[in-house]
Amino acid sequence: MVLSDYLTLFLYLIGVFGIGRVFSRRAGDHKEMFAAGRRSPWWAAGLSSFMTMFSAGTFVVWGGIAYRLGFVAVMINTCYGIAALLAGYFVAGKWNQLGVATPAEYVRLRFGVTGLHFFTWTMLLKRLLGVSVSLYSLGILLVALVPLQEGAPFRDPSTGYLSFTWAVIFFGIVVVVYTMLGGLWAVLMTDVLQFIVLTVVVLLVAWLTISRMDGINAYIDAVPPDFFSPVAEGYGWLFLMGWVIIHFFMIGAEWAFVQRFLAVNSPSEARKSSYLFGAMYLVTPIFWLLPPLLYRGINPDAAPEQAYILSAQAVLPPGLLGLMFAAMFSATASMVSSQLNVFAGVLTLDFYKAMLRPKATNSNLVAVGRFFTIFLGALLVTVAVFVPHLGGAEKLIIAVNSLLVVPLFAPTLWGLFSRRIGVQDMWFVALLSFTLGAFLKFGIIGQQWFSSVESFRPFSELIRDNPKNVEVLVGVLLPLIVLTMLEWSRSKTDEGWTALEEQHKVARKTVSAETLETSNDPVPGQIVLASLGGCSVALIALNAASEDKEGIVIVFAVALLLIGLALRSRLSGRQ
């Protein structure tokens, strides 16, 4: 990167801190800090959920798969859209109707304090591993772009580039600070800003890459014959089906997404937010993954994990590469800040307040929430530094999601509809699936004694040759089968269901009153207009400062201005 790239990245980070500062004034109440006062517009909640799925890992992991295997990466990401539509139809409105402040409050009512402890600490471990991959990926990208002179601070002597550890620490601090200042409002609004920046830059990279290609026929000849196949190399139809189920339970029950359903003021708006999320993931993966898909035809010898940033580096004028990295940072920041806010809210309200200080004041709860945000951020940075020792990004993210998501989230979501499932069933399903999954993946695969036994050899070869399908069978189908059997074998209503019903009766009146009294906040619309205007001005300025003027950059800038004017006119008409 050159000076203009660093300047662009610096100004972007200032903007992110600015949003956190603006919304810090609203975080004086724990409901505002962790639930946005139930005043978020449905479109802001939907865009925030959409961005929560993104991270630098999207560019490193899925970008690497797109470069290596082709269209299958698009199919994998499209599964998110199907899952979000299903979650919107079946569960989004149900969550909003409960009237709980946090999803952990539901778990405590439905499964008791024991269930809350089990679910919280297990999910915290899962998310630490998953989100740390995103922060790790961001560090890898930054290190590749920032060479430093000998003697410079934060330099890695072995590579001559920025130290990976310092890169992770730096961006970890940025995300922690704005999440701590502004709470869920800051997370939602920076997600909207990040969505705009990411969309503009990725589409610009794709367009510039296409303009430099020699034609479609030359591209087809340059890529492998099965590059456009929807399935490839272990990512078959069974895996894709399992991926939809996994992410239905993730979107429907993971606290970062549930918090968005709770942040809007009615069940219908919760459903609309999830429908927006799903519809966008049905149509946008092809655009997000175009750069590495196209770059395979231009440079077939690149390192897959670097294909995305290399494709951007090859076509973007000076200054805009910094904006591209800002977009990658945006995606990672969205995921990390969402998880920090959710878990800080859980530890503050459902552990500190509920178990230690029931009479804690609002100011005390906000201060404790900010402490937990810092603590969890430091823990996350530490785990991110050790990701290379845990098997690498792609292997870790696939294994964690395949083996842990459904066993952890299915009982929780099942309990939202079933009166028979209780905390003992949560423990049984999760521990059975975790134990069997760990045994198959780490206990016998590759063990010589197991494969040497003649009667075990076919089973051993099946596991070894189909690891992703085995993960789907154990991590997805097994817990669903066990839950179905438990449902059929139970006849008595669980105590947790009775407690939830009592809460629901009280919440119906409260939620109805809040829905009538609470209107959507106008500030999110103003943030969108400011973001569109800022991006347009930045594109024009960077293009003017570049020696290689790109007409398409001006076209994008003008398009953003027109979109902003149209939105402003519509917002003004509503007032």
Image (cartoon, grey):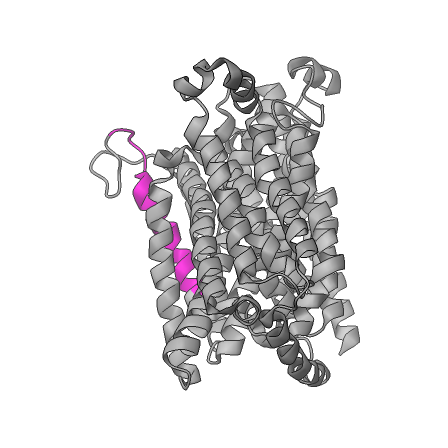
Looking at the image, which residue is at 68% across and 43% down? 244
Looking at the image, which residue is at 55% across and 21% down? 459
Looking at the image, which residue is at 32% across and 48% down? 382
Q: Nearer the viewer, residue 244 or 185?
A: 244
Q: Quadrant of residue 39?
A: bottom right
Left or right for 72, reference 142: right
- Locate residue 386, reporting x and y percent: 34, 40
Where 96 falls versus 322 (above or below)?
A: below
Residue 412 visible in the picture: yes
Where 493 falls versus 207 (above or below)?
A: below
Q: Nearer the viewer, residue 357 or 155?
A: 357
Residue 552 visible in the picture: no
Where 298 falls versus 119 (above or below)?
A: above
- Locate residue 170, reporting x and y percent: 35, 51
Q: Was residue 160 drawn as part of the magenta stretch in this picture?
A: yes
Q: Was residue 106 drawn as part of the magenta stretch in this picture?
A: no
Looking at the image, which residue is at 51% across and 19% down? 456
Q: Quadrant of residue 562?
A: bottom right
Q: Quadrant of residue 572?
A: bottom right
Q: Nearer the viewer, residue 435 or 336?
A: 435
Q: Quadrant of the C terminus?
A: bottom right
- Locate residue 529, reporting x and y percent: 65, 64
Q: Main secondary structure of the magenta part?
A: helix
Left or right for 510, reference 183: right
Stretch of the chain drawn in magenta: 158-179
Q: Quadrant of the N terminus?
A: top left
User: Across the whole image, how many numbered discs are drawn on residues?
Assistant: 0
- Locate residue 169, reporting x and y percent: 33, 50
